[in-house]
Image: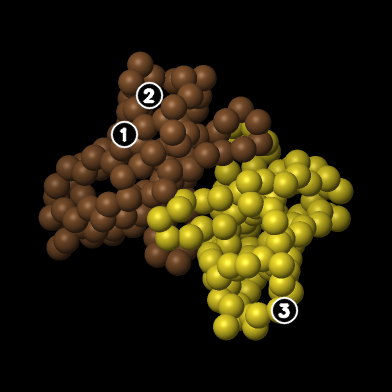
Chain colours: A yellow, B brown
């Protein structure tokens, strides 16, 4: 069953804690992306990775970190430096360029 | 000026109505245009993908691109309550980046 999985679906964090969101894909896509979605603001790019062991900052990378050690996996860490982390986080994959981006089901992060 | 603008709605229509959703964009170099549908608390799913100007039809859905006006539209015929969702326009910028509209929330009333 091909697709993109994100876990957990819901995540609660206390202020000052780091949390890691998981994104796994078995579509054999080269590129992976993390977006943040807030009401009325659309999707904003946090980080993206074109190939293993390489990644680039998107438009709102401050307070976030990523790694790409395997083609299938692109975890996102939300650090305590991120001032407003409560949001819906979406992972996407494609083979780059104008190729269709496919999205995972998302993780809702709430900071208490 | 934002690279892409989309009316956030919400838009409420009766079942069976024709729905028109629109985005405008600023860069005339853009060639590819997409529409995604996003149900509440889910990830977006691709609905339509068009290249350059013209129309593309898929069942009850028609995507239209007018490059001279930098205007893209999605029409839904015979709208159903199951069409209630947020619709996002998306434009690949030619690198690895997409730009997304803010999304239009649609509610189709039974």
Measure the C-alpha gap from mark 2 to mark 1: 10 Å
Choose top left, top right, bottom left or bottom right for residue B81: bottom left
CB-based contact (under 8 Å), mark 1 and mark 3: no
B8 and A5: which one is in front?
B8
Residue found at the very far top of the displayed protein: B68
**Residue B82 placement (x, y as % from top left):** 28, 59
- The quadrant of the rendering that contains the N terminus of chain A is bottom right
Image height check: is A20 above or below A3?
Answer: below
CB-based contact (under 8 Å), mark 2 and mark 3: no
- The answer to whether dots 2 and 3 both sit on one chain is no
Which chain does the numbered disc 2 sit on?
B
Measure the C-alpha gap from mark 1 to mark 3: 43 Å
Mark 3 packing: few (<14 Cα in 10 Å), some, or many (20+)? few
Mark 1 packing: few (<14 Cα in 10 Å), some, or many (20+)? many
Choose top left, top right, bottom left or bottom right for residue B98: top right
Residue on which disc 2 sits? B70
- The quadrant of the rendering that contains the C terminus of chain A is bottom right
Which chain does the numbered disc 1 sit on?
B
Q: Is residue B95 left or right of residue B9?
A: right
Of tags 1 and 3, the one toward the viewer is: 3
Measure the C-alpha gap from mark 2 to mark 3: 44 Å
Q: Answer whether residue B49 is visible to the viewer in this image.
A: no
A39 and B13: which one is in front?
A39
**Residue B91 placement (x, y as % from top left):** 50, 34
**The label number, if any, that marks residue B73 in the structure image:** 1
**Residue B54 placement (x, y as % from top left):** 35, 20
Identify which residue is drawn at 66% across, 36% down.
B96
Image height check: is A40 above or below B72?
Answer: below
Residue on which disc 3 sits? A17
Q: Is residue A91 left or right of residue B106?
A: right
A87 and B76: which one is in front?
A87
């Amino acid at each position: 069953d091909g697709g993109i999985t994100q876990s957990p679906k819901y995540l609660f964090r206390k202020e000052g804690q780091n949390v890691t969101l998981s994104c796994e894909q078995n579509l054999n896509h080269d590129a992976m992306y993390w977006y943040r979605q807030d009401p009325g603001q659309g999707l904003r790019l946090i980080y993206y990775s074109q190939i293993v062991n390489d990644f680039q900052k998107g438009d709102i990378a401050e307070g976030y970190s990523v790694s790409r050690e395997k083609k299938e996996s692109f975890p996102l860490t939300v650090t305590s430096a991120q001032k407003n982390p409560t949001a819906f986080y979406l992972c996407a994959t494609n083979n780059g360029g104008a190729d269709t981006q496919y999205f995972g089901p998302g993780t809702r992060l709430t900071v208490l | 000026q934002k690279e892409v603008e989309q009316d956030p709605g919400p838009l409420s229509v009766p079942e069976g109505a024709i729905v028109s959703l629109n985005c405008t964009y600023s860069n005339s170099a853009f060639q590819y245009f997409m529409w995604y549908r996003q149900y509440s608390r889910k990830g977006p799913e691709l609905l339509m993908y068009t290249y350059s100007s013209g129309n593309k039809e898929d069942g009850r859905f028609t995507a239209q691109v007018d490059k001279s006006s930098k205007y893209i539209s999605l029409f839904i015929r015979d709208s159903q309550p199951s069409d209630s969702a947020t619709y996002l326009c998306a434009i690949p910028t030619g690198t690895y980046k997409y730009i997304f509209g803010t999304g239009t929330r649609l509610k189709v009333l039974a």
